[in-house]
Each structure stands twice: as C-alpha cells, then as structure tokens.
Image (cartoon, helix red, strand yellow):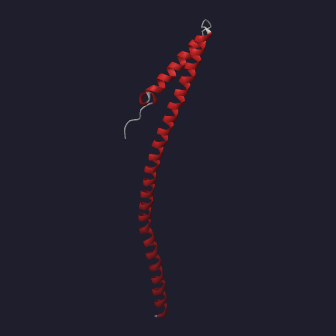
C-alpha cells in the first residue's frame, strides 16, 4: 500500500480555495470599501464557497470509491477466513465421530465380556 497522503498534499486546490476565501472574508470587513467593491468581494466569496463545496463533493466521491474497494477486499478476506475455519473444523468433527464410535465399541466389548464370565 502507498503511504497515506494528507488532504492538502492530495488536493492542494482545496487548501488554495480555503486560503482565498479567508482572504476575501477578511477584506470584506474593511469599512472603507465602496459598495461596488463590497459586491465584488461578496460574489467572490460565493464563488469560492461553491468551488469549495464542489471540491468536497469530489473528495467524498473519491473516498466512497476507495471505501467500496476496501469493502470488496474485506469481503474476499472474510470468505477466505470462513473457508479456512470450515476446513479446520473438519478434523475435530471427525475426531468426535471417531470418539463416539469407540465408545459404542467399548460398550459392546464390555457387554460381551460380562456374558463370557
């Protein structure tokens, strides 16, 4: 398996979007801005938030795909484990049957021994 990457290493655009959004939000607090500049910053913030949401949706889809692949792998391992457990249980079951047979034989031999006295 490859070493896990952090969100920012794998998806640097999301970090960039968040950094830009923080800058826009900070600039929007400036009271010296004109109405037009405020509107432009507001529209920029909305666009950045939309971009952030789209990026997060893509990350979620990617994560779901990865999880589905992991589930498939886990399911195949579970099947393999069940098969091995079934094989391992055959020997004790055979021994139990043999033990029951030997007990019956011992009872018969004991009964025959009583009759021969």
In which quadrant of the rendered view does residue 105 lie? Answer: bottom left
The answer, for residue 117, to whether it is visible in the render is: no
| Residue 70 falls left or right of residue 41 | left
Q: In the image, residue 35 lies at what x, y percent? A: 62, 10
In the image, 113 versus 68, the foreground residue is 68
In the image, 90 versus 2, the foreground residue is 2
Q: In the image, residue 117 lies at what x, y percent? A: 47, 93
In the image, 43 versus 62, the foreground residue is 43
Residue 79 higher or lower than 4, as above or below: below
Residue 47 higher or lower than 78, as above or below: above
- At x 46%, y 72%, the residue is 96
The answer, for residue 80, to whether it is visible in the render is: yes
Q: In the image, residue 53 lies at what x, y percent? A: 54, 30
Residue 78 higher or lower than 48, as above or below: below
Q: Where, quadrant-wise, is the N terminus in this rendering? A: top left
- At x 42%, y 64%, the residue is 88
How many numbered circles does the render carry?
0
Q: In the image, residue 59 lies at what x, y percent? A: 49, 35
Single out the residue that lies furthest toward the front.
Answer: 36
In the image, 83 versus 28, the foreground residue is 28
Single out the residue that lies furthest toward the left.
Answer: 2
In which quadrant of the rendered view does residue 46 lie? Answer: top right
Single out the residue that lies furthest toward the top.
Answer: 32
């Amino acid at each position: 398996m490859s070493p896990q990457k952090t969100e920012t290493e794998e998806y640097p655009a999301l970090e960039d979007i968040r950094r830009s959004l923080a800058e826009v939000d900070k600039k929007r607090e400036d009271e010296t801005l004109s109405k037009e500049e405020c509107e432009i910053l507001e529209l920029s913030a909305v666009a950045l938030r939309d971009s952030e949401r789209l990026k997060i949706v893509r990350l979620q889809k990617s994560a779901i795909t990865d999880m589905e692949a992991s589930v498939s792998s886990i399911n195949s391992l579970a099947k393999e484990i069940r098969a091995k457990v079934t094989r391992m249980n055959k020997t004790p079951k055979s021994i139990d049957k043999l033990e029951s047979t030997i007990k019956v034989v011992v009872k018969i031999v004991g009964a025959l021994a009583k009759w021969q006295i």
